[in-house]
Amino acid sequence: MIPHSDSSRSLLRSFWKSSDQCLQSLASVRPIEEPYFRKLNKYHYDLKLVNAYLDHDNVTEAEGCDAVLVRANCACDEQNLKKFKSYGINWVFTRTVGFNHYDLKAAKELDIKIARVPNYSPYAVANLAFTLGAALTRHVVAAVDAVHRGDFTVSPYYLSTEFNRLTVGIYGAGKIGAIEGKMWKLIGAKVLAYDPYPSDFARQYVKFVSEDDLLQSSDIVSVHVPYFPGKNDNLINSDFLKKMKETAFLINTARGQLADTNAVAKAVEDNEIAGYGADVVIDETRINGHKFNSLAEVPNSSVQSLMKLYPKVLITPHMGSFTEPALEDMISISYDNFHEMQETGDVKNKVEYKG
């Protein structure tokens, strides 16, 4: 195990040399991740690491290099893609599953190739979703917070059911959702799932039902659906929330844009649902990776409204994939993507504009 560091993030700038080609990769990484990039460097690229996020100012770091590797919340908009193209860069890959940080139309027009990491250890996000649901159900954070303030009384609020009596609803039963379902099933919970494309893998752990049945029956609703900009924004809206039980908890470890933040805050505040746990928020490019001195400094009033509802609302800093196995998967597959592109001129994990 590589020792932990509290440093927040950095921009990975990698000069990768094979026998005849140099690749530079720009990615938002934490300093603790740098040894993994070196350890997993099976193609013997030369790596140079630089601290910073990819934005409109430091995009110039890519000049003179052949390729870029980014992650979520890096600025892969038209402006930066044009700058990359002016440097002769035609490969701008991401180490993430999602790719909503790209302007795909601009990439196509510029003939810039994009590849992603289609999957990594599903236990990473599933573990966090499970933990948020478990912590909220047993009121663990509320109790710990009270004790830290010197209050050792057992509040009536702490009374809860037991996990084996829960009905857990997995909204989106891909690999991550299915694995969370597996975790709940192993401790005796009843596990339901809604997915328009039910898989045999998920059927081992969940019972597929309609969307309405899941929302109306579940004590925990855990959302694991991909985000498609302009298509499922605010999927979790007031209508969605009104279908849930007043005693139910909602978990979102997928994307902040899937939830109408104000509607979720109102539902919790009005006791229409019991609580909310999230690893994602809207406006992450201005929030994630920053340390604010007070809640008032958080640059989004809707996110502030959620944070004020702690401990009924628990928010973590988009750390779902921050486990050693998931990190190793993301790095290894990213290296493989570049190697495949070098060797064949194409890559199976490519992302293309569909408009």
Image (spheres, grey):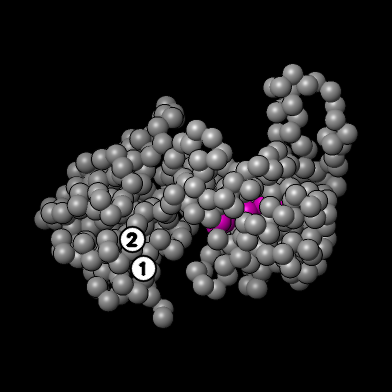
Q: Nearer the viewer, residue 25 or 288?
A: 288
Q: Residue at x 35, y 74 (%)?
A: 105
Q: Is residue 182 visible?
A: no
User: First in sequence: mark 2 or mark 1?
Assistant: 2
Q: Is residue 295 above or below residue 244?
A: above
Q: Which residues are magenta?
A: 249-256
User: How many labels, in total?
Assistant: 2
Q: Amino acid at mark 1?
A: Asp
- Residue 323 left/right relative to 69: right
Query: Is 209 in the magenta?
Result: no
**2 and 1 marks in contact (CB < 8 Å):** yes
Identify the residue under disc 2: 76
Q: Residue at x 29, y 39 (%)?
A: 51
Q: Is residue 111 above or below residue 258?
A: below
In the orientation shown, which residue stands out farthest toward the bottom?
355
Q: Secondary structure at mark 2?
A: loop
Using the rendered view, name the quadrant where residue 246 is placed.
bottom right
Q: Amino acid at mark 2?
A: Cys
Mark linked to residue 103: 1
Query: Is 251 in the magenta?
Result: yes
